[in-house]
Image: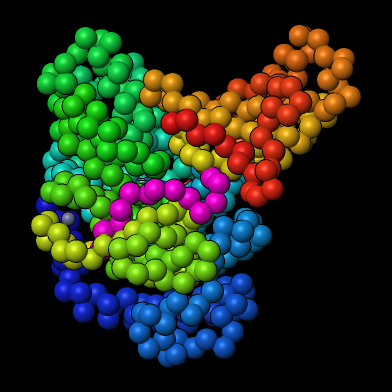
Amino acid sequence: MIFEPELEAMPLEQLAALQLERVRSLVARVKERVPLYRERLEGVEPGDLGSLDDLARLPFTRKDDLRDTYPLGMLAVPREQLARIHASSGTTGKPTIVAYTAGDLDLFARVNARALAMGGAEPGMTLHNAYGYGLFTGGLGIHDGGERLGLNVVPVSGGMTERQLTLIQDLRPDVITCTPSYALTLAHALTERGTEPGEISLRYAVLGAEPWTERMREEIDASLGVTCTNIFGLSEVIGPGVSCECVEERDGSHVNEDHFLPEIVDRETGEPVAEGDEGVLVFTTLTKEALPLVRYWTGDICSLSREPCSCGRTLARMGPIVGRSDDMLIVRGVNVYPSQVGGVLGRVPELSPHFGLVVRRLGTLDEVEVLVEPKADVLAALTDERVEEIAVRAASLLRDTIGCTMAVTLVGPGEAPRSDGGKIQRVRDLR
Ligand code: AMP
Ligand code: ZN
């Protein structure tokens, strides 16, 4: 079913006109209210934007802009009008804070109601929501969307797999939402219990927050007995519900582009790419009140298609995220930048600046091993106990600062990656 058919299946000319009108009022609004934009958009008048193509003349907004104005320097409303705060799962010590007015929360609920309906959910169904509740946008975002659609939402949150299975068996939900890697964990645990996919009630799974593959999709479909769809989003734009696949095609995620205007640009030049080509995904938030963003550089790489879809929606479809323009990794739902890892290791006096990361998939979960060389003068006097002590201290510092558990291994001179003249390859991703 289509939750908001008059908007999701709007004729394309009408959609473009709506977007242009919204872009113009956005530019006026941010110039008036956000110091960063007042400066950056100097000389740009809303009336100068004759068509959506003119958007490409405006500068990008980047994650660093949010970091530089931490925590709430890019707000476009007075603080008293905020109704909620969330944060991006990646941290550099300080998370990226995002804020919502009551109007933004209404929008957040609506786009997630759309996404759940795209994934097969219908009013009256029960939703087992295993996205984490808290600062992360996934739990509460999907929760509100489920309620808005008319689902009975079970706010399970992440973790405690045995309890999840019991709730799935006893409450007989129709739909599950979580990360794809956690869906696989649940599926394996079910198999261990000796439960057949046909014995559980689940029919649909709406999965996202991290990259996944068609192979994982097949495995989840078969092992949970569901039809699973991909949901995409990022905190800076709103959280989950920026786009979602329709259950009819499961071939690209319909972007809720009456609210989030997508562009694909070349990762080096920032120029728009030809339709269908891959590049960096950029979003302009058309209706968000508290934290409106003009041309936000997501760093995610994908393509965009305007091929008509059999579900009837006219919303453009984005392909799967095939990479990042930066070196961000997503490990068990946490965004990890190698540079952050380097920063934390730098606080351990015995360690040299030479380090690398190895990412593996053990079973269904991602594991990160940090390889780091001790300083040369420390090396001479290292005993086994001392090696162990340094590694444990570094690992706990990483966990406390970045929020992701990683194993630390001390390696010999020259064993951590070095630059061969070009960009250093710090990450070996074996997933
Ligand atoms: P956060 O703001 O912490 O929720 O992280 C947002 C990032 O998670 C995005 O920029 C993507 O890199 C990633 N992400 C979210 N959903 C998906 C998805 N369905 N497929 C691939 N990557 C995703
Ligand atoms: Zn569709």
308 and 165: which is toward the camera:
308
What colour-coding does the image apply? rainbow
Instruction: Indicate the quadrant where residue 142 lies.
Output: top left
Label total for image: 0
In percent of width and height, residue 7 lies at 20, 67
| Quarter in which the C terminus is drawn | top left
Does the segment drawn in magenta span residue 247?
no
The residue most toward the front is 420
Q: Is residue 100 visible?
A: no
In percent of width and height, residue 282 lies at 43, 63
Q: Is residue 355 visible?
A: yes
Q: Which residues are magenta?
A: 316-328
What residue lies at 81% left-to-right and 10% top-to-bottom? 383
- Above or below for 290 versus 359: below
What residue lies at 10% left-to-right and 57% top-to-bottom? 310
What residue lies at 50% left-to-right and 68% top-to-bottom? 270
Instruction: Indicate the quadrant where residue 162 lies.
Output: top left
- Above or below for 415 versus 300: above
Does the segment drawn in magenta span residue 318?
yes
What residue lies at 69% left-to-right and 27% top-to-bottom? 415
Q: Give the quadrant of ligand 2.
A: bottom left
Task: Please indicate whether residue 129 sits to the left or right of residue 118 in the image.
Answer: right
Task: Please indicate whether residue 212 sits to the left or right of residue 10 in the image.
Answer: right
Instruction: Indicate the quadrant where residue 286 lies.
Output: bottom left
Task: Please indicate whether residue 318 sits to the left or right of residue 235 in the image.
Answer: left
Characterize the magenta stretch by its predominant secondary structure.
Answer: loop
